[in-house]
Amino acid sequence: MRTGDTIRLKCAAVSEMVPNVYWERKDKPLPAKRTLTNGGNLTIVNVKKGDHGVYNCIASTANGKASYSTTIAVMCE
């Protein structure tokens, strides 16, 4: 990723029950006012250097939860 780009991350979960799917950022909140979530999708517009880090997709039901992590690296121009 380069600063100013838009990133779209997708996360899907399959379960007998309809899961609640959401995103969290390790150690920091999601970027304010530049983050859109829609179901399992996360979009960050106008990526900035400080947006780098580990992002976690969490799917939860009454039976438990599962998560997937990905790392975003941002190159400055």
Image (cartoon, rainbow, N blue to C red):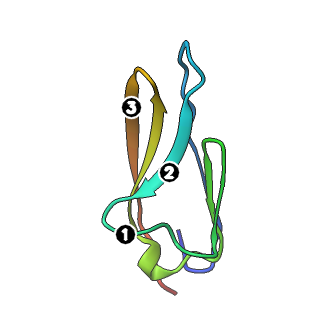
Per the model, the C-alpha gap separating discs 2 and 3 is 12 Å
Which image quadrant for residue 11?
A: top right
Q: In the image shown, does 13 or 61 lie closer to the viewer?
A: 61
Q: Earlier in the sequence, mark 1 or mark 3?
A: 1
- The percent coordinates of residue 57 (x first, y second) are 46, 44
**Disc 1 vs disc 3: Cβ atoms closer than 8 Å?**
no
Q: Is residue 54 left or right of residue 7?
A: left
Q: Is residue 45 left or right of residue 74?
A: right
The amino acid at mark 1 is Lys
Categorize mark 1 by other alpha carbons within 10 Å: few (<14), some (14-19), many (20+).
few
Categorize mark 3 by other alpha carbons within 10 Å: few (<14), some (14-19), many (20+).
few
* Secondary structure state at the residue bearing disc 2: strand
What residue is shown at x 57% (from left), y 32% (from top)?
12
Which image quadrant for residue 68?
A: top left
- The percent coordinates of residue 19 (x first, y second) are 55, 28
* Residue hosting label 1: 28
- Furthest toward the left, the residue is 27
- Furthest toward the bottom, the residue is 77
Categorize mark 2 by other alpha carbons within 10 Å: few (<14), some (14-19), many (20+).
many
**Disc 2 vs disc 1: Cβ atoms closer than 8 Å?**
no
The amino acid at mark 2 is Trp
Q: Earlier in the sequence, mark 2 or mark 1?
A: 2
- The percent coordinates of residue 71 (x first, y second) are 39, 56
* Residue hosting label 3: 66
The amino acid at mark 3 is Ala
* Secondary structure state at the residue bearing disc 1: loop
Per the model, the C-alpha gap separating discs 2 and 1 is 12 Å
* Secondary structure state at the residue bearing disc 3: strand
Q: Which numbered dot is residue 23? A: 2
